[in-house]
Amino acid sequence: MISIKRIKGQEYPLSKGDIVVCITKDFSEFTFGKQYILYSDSSSLLPITSDLGNRHLPAYYSSDEYYFLPLSVWRELKINKILE
C-alpha cells in the first residue's frame, strides 16, 4: 500500500472526467489499485461509481493522508519506485 502524506490546502485538484486510483484497502466497495472516473466536479468527496455499481461519495483524503490519487500522480510514484 502507498501512503502519501497530505498537506492541508495542497490537495491535487480534480474535476469531472478525471481518473483517480484507489490507494487504500479501507473501503469495501473500492479496490486498491483500480481506476475510477469522476462523474462530476469534486472537492473532498469523490463522485465515483463503486465496484458494485453504486454512486458513492468516498472521502478523497483523511486529515493526514490520501485514499485516492489522480492517475498521473499514481503513475509517477510507481515509476519512481521502479527506478529506486
Image (spheres, helix red, strand yellow):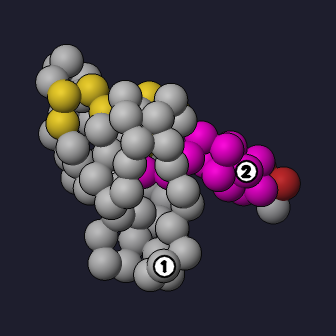
Write the start and end of the magenta stretch as one range. 67-81
**Residue 27 seen by the camera:** yes
Q: Within the image, what quadrant is residue 46 found in?
A: top left
The residue depicted at 51 percent of the width and 49 percent of the height is: 14
Q: Residues within 10 Å of mark 2 (few under 14, many from 20)?
A: few
Asked if residue 22 is among those painted magenta in the image, a careful observer would answer no
Q: Secondary structure at mark 1?
A: loop
Left or right: 47 in relation to 15: left
**Residue 33 seen by the camera:** no
**Tag on residue 76?**
2
Locate residue 40, reporting x and y percent: 37, 34
The residue depicted at 37 percent of the width and 57 percent of the height is: 43
Locate residue 71, reporting x and y percent: 59, 41
Look at the numbered discs 1 and 2 and tell me whether their residues touch, using CB distance below 8 Å.
no
Locate residue 74, reporting x and y percent: 61, 48
- Amino acid on which the number 2 mark rests in the picture: Glu
Q: CA distance from mark 1 to mark 2?
A: 21 Å
**Tag on residue 24?**
none
Asked if residue 71 is among those painted magenta in the image, a careful observer would answer yes
- Dot 1 or dot 2: first in sequence order is 1
Quadrant showing the C terminus: bottom right
- Amino acid on which the number 1 mark rests in the picture: Gly
Q: Most extreme residue toward the right, as rendered?
A: 83
Judging depth in this view, the residue of 39 and 84 nearest the camera is 39
Q: Secondary structure at mark 2?
A: helix
Q: Main secondary structure of the magenta part?
A: helix
Locate residue 13, reporting x and y percent: 54, 56
Judging depth in this view, the residue of 69 and 40 nearest the camera is 40
Left or right: 84 in relation to 31: right
Q: Which residue is mark 1?
A: 9
